Structures are given as structure tokens and as C-alpha cells.
Amino acid sequence: MNRTPASPASSTESPDGSRDAPCRDLGAARWTTSSHSGSGDQCVEVAALPGARHAVRDSKDPRGPALLLAPAEWRAMLDRVASL
């Protein structure tokens, strides 16, 4: 999992050797918020990225950092959230 600002144009290599989506791609990402989040201000937004990766950010700070998740990390996070 990588924490990265949403604006710089850079990319990083994951432990598995694959490349994360360049951060500049997040500017064009389609961010969505869960319908379960209601009108509260404690929401996260998710964007699907190329290579089955996902980005997650705080909806209160859309210009702030985003977490870039590899496919296995995304699946593990979903499994963990579903088990709560």
C-alpha cells in the first residue's frame, strides 16, 4: 500500500515489481462515495485505476493524500470491512 499525494506526477514500484498508477492519473479518476455513507462527513472516496488497482481518499480532503492499493490489498481491505 502506498500513501501518495494526489497531485505530483510520479509512480512507485510495488513489492511485486508492478508499477502503481502515476499520481497524475488521480486527477482524471472518477471518485465515488458509498451510498451507505449518508450525509455524514466521515466518508472515504474510492476510484478504480488501471491494472485493477484502487485509490482511497478522505472525502473532506480531496486534494490531500490518497492510498493506492494493489488488487490483493484492495481485496483484503474489502474482506476486513465486510467482517466488521
Image: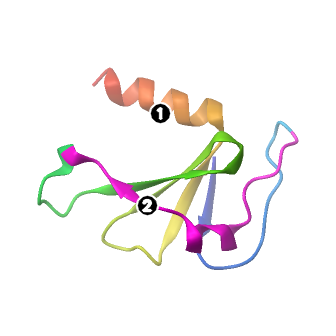
Mark 1 = which residue?
A: 77
- Which amino acid, mark 1? Met
Picture residue at 57% right of the left edge, 74% below the top = 27
Q: Is residue 34 left or right of residue 63?
A: left
Q: Earlier in the sequence, mark 1 or mark 2?
A: 2
Magenta span: 17-35
Whole-percent x, y for residue 63 in the image:
47, 78
Of all residues shown, which one is farthest toward the top? 83
Element at label 1: helix
- Which amino acid, mark 2? Trp
Of all residues shown, which one is farthest toward the right? 17
The correct choice, above or below, for 32 with respect to 64 in the image is above
Of all residues shown, which one is farthest toward the left? 39
Label 1 vs label 2, nearer the camera? 2
Whole-percent x, y for residue 6 in the image:
58, 72
Q: Residues within 10 Å of mark 1 (few under 14, many from 20)?
A: few
Q: Which mark is residue 24?
A: none
Q: Is residue 22 left or right of residue 80?
A: right
Element at label 2: loop
The correct choice, above or below, for 17 with respect to 21 in the image is above
Picture residue at 37% right of the left edge, 63% below the top = 58
Whole-percent x, y for residue 26 in the image:
59, 68
Q: CA distance from mark 1 to mark 2?
A: 18 Å
Q: Closest to the observer: 70 or 29?
A: 29
Mark 2 = which residue?
A: 31
Q: Which quadrant would residue 3 be assigned to in this image?
A: bottom right
Q: Which quadrant would residue 32 be assigned to in this image?
A: bottom left
Q: Closest to the observer: 29 or 41?
A: 29
Q: Is residue 13 left or right of residue 66?
A: right
Whole-percent x, y for residue 34 in the image:
28, 48
Query: Is residue 36 within the magenta segment?
Result: no
Picture residue at 33% right of the left edge, 66% below the top = 59
